[in-house]
Image (cartoon, rainbow, N blue to C red):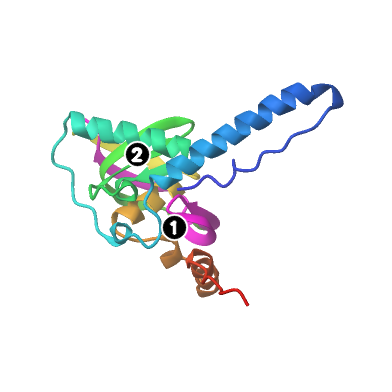
Amino acid sequence: MADHDHDHTHHDHDHGDHDHDHAEDEQQLEREARRMLALARIRQYGDTVLRMKAREVDTFDADLERLVERMTALMHEANGVGLAATQVGVLRRLFVFVEDGEDRVLINPTITASSKEVEVDDEGCLSLRDVLVPVERPTKVTLEGVDLKGEPVTMELEQPASRVAQHEIDHLDGILIIDRTDDESRRAALATLRPQPVLGTR
């Protein structure tokens, strides 16, 4: 899931601060370059893998640990707050996300309880660049699954982590945010996602 709250940076320019600004601008450019590289390694809308259902994880080994490490690094480089295995082309039921500033992983996740209270909020996605659509979700969820060692885990999540987790579990079922939004928002999102026709010169 994309973190649209942290994408906006602003500089308060002070005349005595040009060197500092220059260094900050360079850091900003470097971060943006890293983000674009990371996004290039994340499957984008139109890739068939994003519509496939992931399979349960049954082998807990060093390969799984490496996958989780790679996904966590990629999530941060792309300025995301969650990433599902299907988004890196791996059809396994697991996702990584950030909760209260901590990196978490949940394998073979299921939602076992959801609050009656729901909330509509804009969601972005690392696989649907430049798209932000309103999605209604329960504000609290209880998740069950296992950790990297295959040990049972229960997580009780509130906003914003509950929204992120529901978004990532959708990915594991081949469901995207455009499937969960209203018709008007979906139409606008699809217009953004569709490659624009190249017009011949007149």
Mark 2: give few (<14), some (14-19) or many (20+) Cα within 10 Å.
some
- Callout 1 amino acid: Lys
Residue identified by numbered label 2: 155
- In the depicted structure, whether residue 32 falls above or below residue 199: above
Is residue 141 inside the magenta stretch? yes
Q: Position of residue 55 (x, y in %)?
A: 19, 51
In the picture of the structure, the residue carrying the numbered disc 1 is: 116
Q: Give the residue drawn at x 25%, y 47%.
A: 90
Q: Secondary structure at mark 2?
A: strand
To which quarter of the image does residue 60 belong? top left
In the rendered image of this protein, does residue 53 appear above or below residue 154? Answer: below
- Magenta segment, which residues? 119-148
Please name whichever residue, 129 or 145, is drawn nearer the observer in this view of the structure.
Answer: 129
**Residue depicted at x 13% and y 41%:** 58
What residue do we see at 49% from left, 47% from top? 2
Q: Position of residue 118 (x, y in %)?
A: 49, 58
